[in-house]
Image: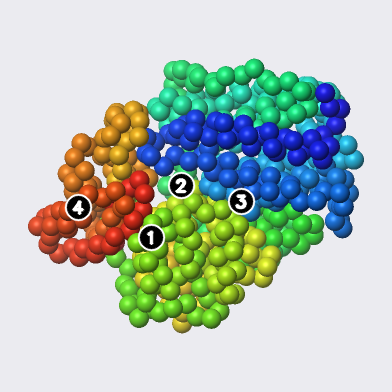
Amino acid sequence: MLDTLDAAAVRRWCADGLAALKRHQTEIDRLNVYPVPDGDTGTNMVLTLTSAQQALAMDLDTLPDGEVTPHGHALRLMARGALLGARGNSGVILSQILRGLADAAGAEPVVRGHALTSALRDATAAAYRAVARPVEGTLLSVVAAAAAGAERAETDDLCAVAAAAAEEAAVALARTPEQLPALARAGVVDAGGRGLCLLLDALVEVVTGERPARSTPAPRAAARPATAVRETGSDQYGYEVQFLLDADPEAVDRLRDALDALGDSLVIVGDGVAGTGTWNVHVHVNDVGAAIEAGVVAGRPHGISVTRFADQSAPMVPATTDQSAATAPATAGRSAVVVAPGAGIAELFRGEGATVVPGNPSTGELLDAIRASGAARVVVLPNDANTEAVASAAAKEAHRLGVKVSVVPTRSPVQALAALAVRDPGRRFEDDVIAMAEAAGACRYAEVCHASREALTVAGPCQPGDVLALVEGEVHLIGVDLVDTCVAMVDRMLGGGGELVTLISGADAPDGLVDAVRAHVGRRWPFVEVQAYPGGQPHYPLLVGVE
């Protein structure tokens, strides 16, 4: 048994935790609230911790300037590696948990029970700060429970605190379906929380020498599940405003009060630098100008992005496009970095003058692409909800290198095409980002795939092999025939208005699928223009955009 957590123990913990994640990678991937075939939480956590282990492979014998303890250096290497290798929301949150541990425990001369308790509290705070719209019943609830379990142990015994934290995390994991109805409907526990439990059990094994005897927890039956917070925030507010801010903590405290009075979903995350630091500010408001003005009063805002939440029940007016701007390459001082899940989609983006990164990138891969563009101002289009958090982390790292980066939170390649179509190098960068965000927000998106397992969705029960039509990330239709389901989905989207339909066929799309959908639109909606491209994306035979 260990009395303290030293650098060697940190390295063993990282290696053992990674091995545990790899053993359970497929299991975690399958803990997916939707029965779509791209559940990858386990894979993302493995890749994130792999990067952490690679960072720990550096020589720890000599402490760099500014480092006080070997264990602090090891923890910071682990956190930094995880940040650069982070993939998906789970990877980004995990990297922030490790950063919280490193900041707190690394400053202690020795890490015993009380120090680990304090570190878990800081890790929880860092995890919540990393999420723009925190939702209980997720990885956040599990790390918070671990910190609470450590506090209730009330001891300086490292082994007892680690065991208490791991035990309470396991209990919280089993409780996640009671907190998040989507988990209860799917009959699973939270995937990211399951991964964190494995890491905490690995820590227990490192410090005690004994592996906790724990099986995969079964979800409890909840009579009346609690209502989950909407991940897009309250529908009272129509805009999402996000920017980086150089300011001191006192000014940020005043900014919190000002923005809290303007809207909701307020999150402000700092970089941990003492004095005047850099803060990532996120809020949902109706008055965009007032939110940005509050940032100007507090300090120096930059990397401003504004997203308009589309009203799905109202007809959408297509944004006007300037074809010359759409096809113009990036200027020397400005560039766009776009994530592309397929070879055909990548060619489309390259044709728009963008730097392309393959699907599901890490923070480091996006950062490399930003730096390789050679531009001082870069807009990043992530094209996936999970990649959005990775893009934000890369933008923060790029800022430290002197590159101004704005993330337009696109959720599909069709939204990125709409955003790139209105890009105008003649505009101010900030104005161009706003125009791109508005164009992306005005493009409704959908995708079609085959169910990977039996599940209960908001559209009803589905069986493996059923055709699922997801509109804005939510299952709207369940069918048997691929063409019929695609046609019905397009009809449903055009029922809310639209003048342009974009179809992107996937790697598994059967011959004639796009032609059948195009022909139907021509008959049913004769005044709607249709554009079709081969995308080559996996899992989804068809992506659809309506503007």
In the picture, the disc for residue 232 is: 2
- The residue under label 4 is 511
Mark 4–mark 3 Cα distance, whole angstroms, equals: 38 Å
Residue 20 is at least partly visible in this image: yes
Q: Earlier in the sequence, mark 3 or mark 1?
A: 3
Q: Amino acid at mark 2?
A: Thr
Which is more foreground, mark 4 or mark 3? 4
Q: Are marks 2 and 3 in contact (CB under 8 Å)?
A: no
10 Å neighbourhood of mark 3: few (<14), some, or many (≥20)? many
User: What kind of residue is marked 3?
Assistant: Gly
Disc 3 from disc 1: Cα separation: 23 Å
Residue 151 visible at all: no
Q: Is tag 2's residue or tag 4's residue first in the polypeptide sequence?
A: 2
Numbered disc 4: secondary structure: loop
**Rendered position, 302 above or below 191:** below
Marks 2 and 4, how far apart in space?
Answer: 36 Å
In the displayed structure image, the side of residue 492 where residue 236 appears, left or right: right
Residue 242 image offset from top left, x and y in percent: 55, 59
Q: Would you say the residues marked 3 and 1 are in contact, meaning their CB atoms lie under 8 Å apart?
A: no
**Quarter of the image that includes the N terminus:** top right
Q: Depth check: 27 or 127 in front? A: 27
Residue 467 lies in quadrant: top left
Circle 2 Cα neighbour tier, 10 Å, few/some/many (<14 / 14–19 / ≥20): few
Amino acid carrying mark 4 in the image: Asp
> Is residue 120 shown above or below 260?
above
Q: Disc 1 to disc 2, how far (Cα)?
A: 30 Å
Label 1 packing within 10 angstroms: few (<14), some (14-19), many (20+): some
| Discs 2/4, front | 4
Q: Amino acid at mark 1?
A: Ala
Residue 247 at x, y percent in the picture: 71, 62
